[in-house]
Amino acid sequence: MDIATLVFSALYQFGDAFAFLVLSACGLAVIFGMMGVINLAHGEFIMCGAYVTAATVHAGLPLPLGILAGTIVSALVGVLVELTVIRHLYDRPLDTIVATWGLSLIATQGTLIMVGSTMAGVGTPFGSFQVGDYSYSIYRIVLFCAALGVLAGLYALFNWTRFGVLARATIQVPHMAAALGVDTRLIYSLTFACGAGLAGLAGGLYAPTMTLVPTMGATFIMEAFVTVVIGGADVFLGTAPAGGLLAIVKSGMTSWQGQLFGQIGLLVAVIIVVRVLPKGISGFVLRERT
Amino acid sequence: MSGFVSFFRRLEGPQTVGRGPAFWSLFAVVMMIALAYPLFSDGYTVGNTVYFFVWVFIALSLCLIWGYGGSLSFGQTAFFGIAGYGYGVLTLNFGSAYGFTLVALVIAVAIAALFAVLLGYFMFFGRIAGVFLGIVTLAVTLMLERFMAQTAGPEWHIGSARLNGFNGMSAMPPLTIPWPGEPIVLFADVGLYYFVFGLLVFVYLALRILMNSSFGNVIVAIRENPERAEMLGYDVRKYQLITFVIGAALAGISGVLYTAWGQYITPSSMGMTAAALPLIWVAVGGRSDLTSTVVGTLVVLAAFQALTIYGSQYALIFMGVLLVLTVLIAPNGLVLGAMNWLGRLAARLTQRVS
């Protein structure tokens, strides 16, 4: 095996880890960054997206449309959750954790009762290609591009649209935004829906690559939380670099010692980074700037 | 002598609900009933009651850290699991002779506490607070579960104790008290009942004294306003770390007793669902008071078990709904609300009499 294939293999694993971290974390990061709410039901929104995607694909729709359907349904469920529960808890951030945990219990167990312990999966599209002695899945490359696309899309949304401007105004000084006529409650609802939709998108994108079980959300949330904790409140200055850093740790540890040590490496990285940079990477960057 | 009296004065105070002769006579009546209860019941029911008592310790630990300290920790089940596995490994290696099981209890709880010192140092001295604390502790717990679940192979063993992966460890000896002649083996019925009940009453009263001491007042002050507590000269991080470690030790006691009770421990006792349950008991009971936590935990556990018998798969959904509704409608907890209401009622009645 020559150096080029080795480098490609490392890059591929890095890209795979990066896509997984960023896609699973950005929905959580949007909600946390905007509203200071940690959505512990995040994994269940991902599961919702994956299930809807699989169901629509089984019904005969092509995969991209299925993923779109999963995203939209998750966003709608997000609006519902925001209206019924989250809205009443904005002044009690710790209680939102507890309440969303209750929701996650309900969602996991409810899915188990209604759909059963497993759901027929969707085949991974596109096949694979060969580099050196190893074959790689093309879909993983697609996922990496999707992660970059999501980051770019979020950047455009929050910087170039009216919604983005209003949303950023609402985070910065909520009562001033309200005084200027911004419907802050609507903004919060839409932001929550946006985060839930991103979770659904992650679920839809990963639906072809994993087994669909009601507890599948748990495989995402640890990575998602870890990325958000390290990244801090800002999606672009936080989540993206945190995803890059953690992807190096995770892919390195995984190829050295196996998947479990990849995850342990993530955890150790978090504890150390948090000890050094309590406000995450974005907090560090923003403090340097001022 | 006066120091002795003032020490026991701390049994009641601003941080705990319940004071005066009325409360303590009720307490005495409950104690009497609890002590006499095994005489009127069969071994299985008593063993089941012990199971409820076992969980009260972890609920109290969460009450201490979350309710009094204001730091939401999802890591209690991690300490539970560490101590449970610790007890299993120790007793499977060294047996139960010469009262070693009690030594193993202490060592296992100490291991959990040590782990809490390590984790707590990084968290509190890194000034993680609020939601981040919850996430880091949750990540640690899930990580431990995943780690233990993959230890199925024969290469995973400590001494002669196999860790057995997802199936967990089993067949460790129950707690045994050395006694001249015949050692008393505490199987999960009357014997263990009195042991656990005694420990529970001791821990409950000790925590009452602790929370009404100056330490407890500082903890509550930090919960109410960390900056102000810091300005008054208290090292917030140190107090939070000590609370966290005490809480971890309590959760560890729960873990050891659980392992000794059922003679098994599995990684799923550290999973998401397992971590959610103590939170529900404490939130529903009333997290900022010890008595409410104990009562709430026992009531919710009994209700959960009854529900599991009649509609097994819907029980968890009911728990989730209960948790969400409690947070939305009665954020201070149902039992605490009821007790405060009773207290006001009693005060009004006594005023009218005088």
Image (cartoon, coloured by chain):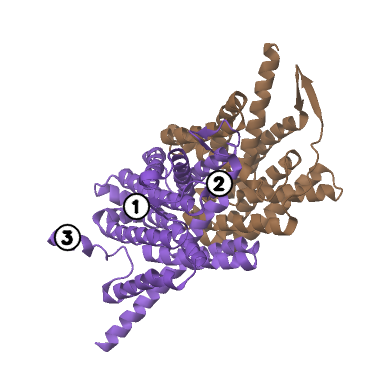
Chain colours: A brown, B purple
- The residue nearer to you, when weighing A112 against A103, is A112
Pointer 1 indicates a residue of which chain?
Answer: B
Check disc 2 and report its element: helix, strand or loop. loop
Q: Which residue is mark 2?
A: B266
**Tag 2 and tag 1 share a subunit:** yes
- Disc 1 to disc 3: CB gap under 8 Å: no
Dot 1 alpha-carbon crowd within 10 angstroms: few under 14, some 14 to 19, many 20 or more: few
Q: Nearer the viewer, residue A59 or B249?
A: B249
Of the residues under marks 1 and 3, which one precedes in the sequence?
A: 3
Q: In the figure, is residue B222 to the left or right of A211?
A: left
- The x, y position of residue B340, in whole percent, is 38, 73
Q: Earlier in the sequence, mark 2 or mark 1?
A: 1
The percent coordinates of residue A289 (x first, y second) are 45, 33
* Distance from the alpha carbon under mark 2 to that under mark 1: 35 Å
Q: Chain of mark 2?
A: B
Q: Give yes or no for contact between labels 3 and 2 (Cβ–Cβ under 8 Å).
A: no
